[in-house]
Image (spheres, rainbow, N blue to C red):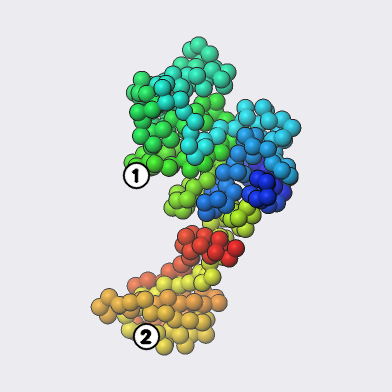
Amino acid sequence: MIEAIALTKSYGPRLALNNVSFTIERGEIVGFLGPNGAGKTTTMRILTGFLPATGGDARVAGFDVFESPMEVKRRVGYLPESPPLYPELSVGDYLGFIAELRGFTGRARHQRTGSVMERVGLSGWERRILGSLSKGYRQRVGLAQALLHDPPVLILDEPTSGLDPAQLVGIRDLVKSLAGTHTVILSTHILSEVEALCPRALVITKGQLVAQGSLDELRAMAPRGDWYLVEVDGLDGPRLGALPQVDLVEPLGADGAWRTFRLNARVDPRPAVAELAREAGARVRTLEHRLPTLEEAFVSIVGRE
């Protein structure tokens, strides 16, 4: 549904994108991660036809972005980081205007704008002037205009910027509901948002795509890798470290008689720990396989560049 092939973009002597390639399948919600200035917004603007590339190719919904830009625009809903709103218009007038641009007229325009406003939590706000809205509500209006024509592809640049926690939950639920029927690429700095919404993510830095895959695959790129959390009463670090499966034991703390350890191991040590505890008459409260956090993985991946 979205395909980028060796995308390159130069601003004079500065190379903003360098040979970026990826594919997003129909119905996927994919996170797009990277530090400020990494090239995320530039990539999104190229995919929407807003900005020409210096080199490479891009296809969206089966159409070449550079050869058929109007066909792409008909099939894409785009929410830029700062929605381009007309501050003197009311919410209803603005969305009605966008609906007309998208080909809705008469009763169909009224029904469609009402439906989308309800979906993003703007019901009853028709007469509010855009210039008087908080940033969070301006984001909602921006998301509404992106959804008005029910596009198969949504490109969202920081869609929850400025939302309070209650609004955040509503917009997350909305984005989740799009999975399967819409293809979504979502740029954000909020890693918990990616964990809540995106089974897969792309990581870009300094104009280059440096990692992509499932969230578990990205977490596995953190330098310390996966590990095992063990809480026991009656076993100490040296005895756990003597197990052949265990490479390293790190004490993490104590809670009364309970001792907590981090185990690094080549193979799953949990059966061996359980057997050792049984033989020693010790108690086991926790035996968990842990992956690095997405934040640890992100810092590791970006930091390597």
Q: Residue 138 or 115: which is nearer the viewer?
A: 138
Q: Is residue 177 visible?
A: no
The C terminus lies in which quarter of the figure? bottom right
> Residue 149 appears at what percent x and percent y?
55, 25
Q: Which residue is tagged 1?
A: 165
Q: Quadrant of residue 206?
A: bottom right
Density class for disc 2 (Cα within 10 Å; few <14, some 14-19, many ≥20) is some
The N terminus lies in which quarter of the figure? top right
Question: Mark 2–mark 1 contact, CB under 8 Å?
Answer: no
Q: Residue 277 or 117: which is nearer the viewer?
A: 117
> Residue 228 appears at what percent x and percent y?
45, 72
Q: Which residue is tagged 2?
A: 236
Q: Residue at x 54, y 48 (%)?
A: 31
Q: Residue at x 70, y 51 (%)?
A: 19
Query: Element at badge 1?
Result: helix
Question: Which is in the foreground here, disc 2 or disc 1?
Answer: 1
Q: Residue at x 68, y 43 (%)?
A: 3
Q: Residue at x 58, y 65 (%)?
A: 304
Q: Amino acid at mark 2?
A: Asp
> Residue 65 appears at what percent x and percent y?
69, 35
Query: Element at badge 2?
Result: loop
Give the spatial CA distance, label 2 vs label 1: 43 Å
Q: Amino acid at mark 1?
A: Pro
Left or right relative to 132: residue 62: right
Q: Residue 46 or 215: which is nearer the viewer?
A: 46
The mark nearer the N terminus, 2 or 1, is 1
